[in-house]
Image (spheres, grey):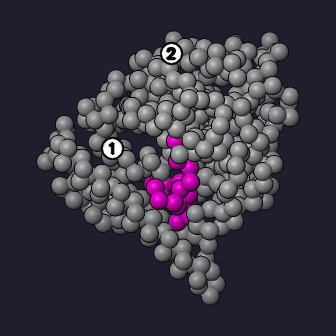
């Protein structure tokens, strides 16, 4: 018999004005669903910094295998415009503490998609707390007791970190940050003059220009924060837009970081819109953000939430499931995860697996089997 219940947890307050709800800011609550088969001794936490995982495809398969799952939302569910990865740690910690309080013998973190870097960041800090502030310099009041460590981390379709994804996907051909239609033709991967397959020289210039754009935005955010906070009546933060953030050459050139994927990237495939259309859309990576939130989650120089870097700082066993047809997570990312996990890491291929495993029920069952078998050996 399996039960399911709503879980409501208190969380420590985060950044000022990080929600439009006054009730939420003054009395933060995070919500989840605990699916618990009778006799279960192992619990898994499924969590993403912004996605709602209550309907995650692994919940029922894991329950049939005797593993309880807590699919917990964070305070930023559905809205990353004000997301600070440092405060997400508090939400993960509240969820892990709740599972510990229920008496489970083992608690594992399942890092799926963007949850992978999040769980790695959490476990690294749970084992050795070093965070005292955000990259913007705002204090984060985290104590070791707020972050109980887990017993293992399972990574599936594992993104290596929000800042790394932004670095690879931001469009370097934007010539004017205030004009979403401005284009530097020689850097436009969607332009008629630059059709795939892309020459190595183009990719080298393109990647360098992407890093330069991210650095410019980061420096602008830092400079603006210093100015705002130096005013006679200080202003803590400011919102801004980041145009065109869906432009990784790997979306169109399948020879780059080759795997079994089809072209377009995961957003184009799931929304049935061309990659170029996603790039110019109103809803893509980091489109709406603030100076401090950009530094915490999107800035390659300032974010602390790099997945492999944090995983290397942990000591727990790691399971890595590589979705071989993933259009968003690539073989080079898997190599980074394996290097970070070292001898602690066990890796399995999910042949033909797309990022979300849409319409691939047999691969979902395979993933659940692998997670169960690994968890039983902890």
Of 132 and 323, the residue lying toward us: 132
- Classify 10 Å Cα crowding around label 1: few (below 14), some (14-19), many (20 and above): many
The structure residue drawn at horizontal position 23% and vertical position 53%, both measured from the top left corner, is: 205
The numbered mark at residue 352 is: none
Name the residue tied to disc 1. Answer: 248
Q: Is residue 125 left or right of residue 224?
A: right
Question: Secondary structure under badge 2?
Answer: helix
Element at label 1: loop
| Residue 307 visible in the displayed image | no
**Residue 284 location (% of width, % of height):** 43, 47
Q: Is residue 370 magenta?
A: no
Q: Residue at x 55, y 14 (%)?
A: 366
Relative to the observer, which residue lies in front, 130 or 325?
130
Q: Report the Cα–Cα distance between label 1 and label 2.
A: 27 Å
Rendered location of residue 161, percent (x, y): 50, 45
Q: Determine which quarter of the picture holds residue 58.
A: top right
Vertical position of residue 146 compared to residue 274: above or below: below
Reply yes or no: does residue 307 show up in magenta: yes
Which span of residues is magenta-colored? 281-308
Quadrant in the rendering for residue 178: bottom left
Mark number for residue 363?
A: 2
The quarter of the image holding the N terminus is top right
């Amino acid at each position: 018999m399996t039960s399911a219940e709503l879980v409501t947890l208190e969380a420590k307050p985060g950044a000022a004005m990080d929600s439009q709800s006054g009730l939420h800011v003054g009395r933060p609550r995070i919500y989840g669903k605990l699916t618990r088969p009778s006799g279960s001794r192992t619990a898994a936490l499924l969590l993403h910094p912004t996605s709602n995982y209550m309907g995650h495809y692994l919940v029922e398969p894991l329950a049939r295998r005797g593993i309880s799952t807590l699919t917990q939302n964070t305070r930023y569910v559905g809205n990353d415009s004000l997301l600070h990865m440092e405060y997400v740690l508090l939400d993960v910690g509240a969820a892990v503490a709740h599972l510990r309080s229920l008496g489970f013998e083992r608690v594992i973190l399942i890092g799926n998609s963007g949850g992978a870097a999040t769980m790695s960041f959490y476990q690294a800090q749970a084992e050795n707390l070093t965070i005292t502030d955000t990259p913007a310099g705002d204090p984060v009041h985290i104590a070791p007791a707020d972050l109980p460590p887990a017993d293992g981390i399972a990574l599936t379709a594992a993104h290596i970190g929000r800042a790394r994804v932004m670095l690879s996907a931001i469009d370097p051909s934007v010539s004017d940050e205030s004009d979403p239609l401005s284009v530097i033709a020689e850097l436009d991967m969607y332009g008629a003059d630059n059709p795939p397959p892309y020459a190595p020289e183009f990719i080298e210039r393109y990647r360098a220009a992407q890093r330069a754009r991210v650095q410019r935005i980061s420096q602008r955010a830092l400079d603006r924060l210093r100015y705002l906070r130096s005013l006679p009546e200080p202003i803590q933060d400011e919102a801004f837009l980041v145009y065109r953030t869906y432009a990784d050459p790997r979306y169109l050139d399948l020879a780059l970081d080759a795997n079994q994927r089809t072209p377009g990237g995961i957003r184009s495939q799931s929304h049935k819109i061309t990659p170029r259309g996603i790039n110019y859309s109103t809803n893509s990576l980091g489109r709406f953000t603030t100076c401090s939130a950009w530094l915490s989650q999107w800035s390659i120089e300032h974010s602390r939430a790099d997945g492999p870097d944090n995983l290397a700082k942990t000591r727990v066993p790691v399971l890595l499931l590589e979705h071989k047809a993933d259009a968003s997570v690539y073989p080079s990312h898997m190599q980074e995860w394996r290097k970070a996990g070292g001898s602690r890491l066990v890796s399995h291929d999910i042949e033909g697996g797309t990022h979300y495993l849409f319409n691939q029920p047999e691969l979902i069952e395979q993933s659940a089997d692998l997670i169960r078998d690994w968890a039983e050996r902890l």
